[in-house]
Amino acid sequence: MRYWFQQVLGWVLIGFALFTFYQVRYIFLDEKRVIEAVVDAVIGVVVFRGGIHLLKVATAARAAMEVRKELAPPKPLKTIKLPGNDRTHGRQRPSVVPGAGERRAT
């Protein structure tokens, strides 16, 4: 969901920058105000670059998530114990807890 938000915000910033460039054209050509047009053009360039950057980051994050899913190690298979397939060959193993198999002499 975060990637969609970044992409939508990036496209909104690009749209705002294009609208700013349209305003710069109007201010520069129709009203002949050069200084205001230059200031607005610089603002438009910064906003446009910010929008492009957000789009690049969102695309790279989505690609990284897809690669992480593909490169994830497979889940280990469940081991099956077969009877008589251990070292004792079906015999009962002695207890490793001290005193568990011994009887106390009274």
Image (cartoon, rainbow, N blue to C red):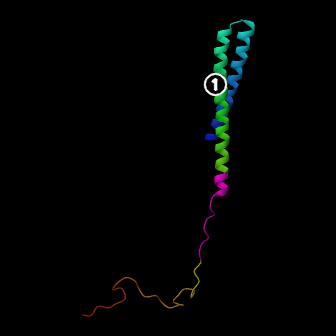
- Nearer to us in this view, 76 or 42: 42
Q: Residue at x 64, y 25 (%)?
A: 47
Mark 1 neighbour density, 10 Å: few (under 14) some (14–19) many (20 or more): few
Amino acid type at circle 1 is Val
Whether 71 is among the magenta residues is yes
Quadrant for the C terminus in the image: bottom left
Q: Which residue is mark 1?
A: 46
Residue 4 point in image, percent of width and height: 65, 39
64 shown above or below 105: above
In which quarter of the view is residue 34 placed? top right
Numbered circles on residues, count: 1
Q: Quadrant of the N terminus?
A: top right
For this rendering, which residue is in front, 21 or 79?
21
Q: Position of residue 23 (x, y in %)?
A: 70, 15
Q: Residue furthest bottom?
A: 105
Any magenta on residue 62?
no
Left/right placement of residue 85 relative to residue 97 reads right
| The magenta segment | 67-79
| Rendered view: 25 above or below 55 | above
Helix, strand or loop: magenta stretch: loop
Relative to 93, say whether 56 is above or below. above
User: Closest to the observer: 81 or 36?
Assistant: 36
Where is residue 77 drawn, in percent x and y?
A: 62, 70
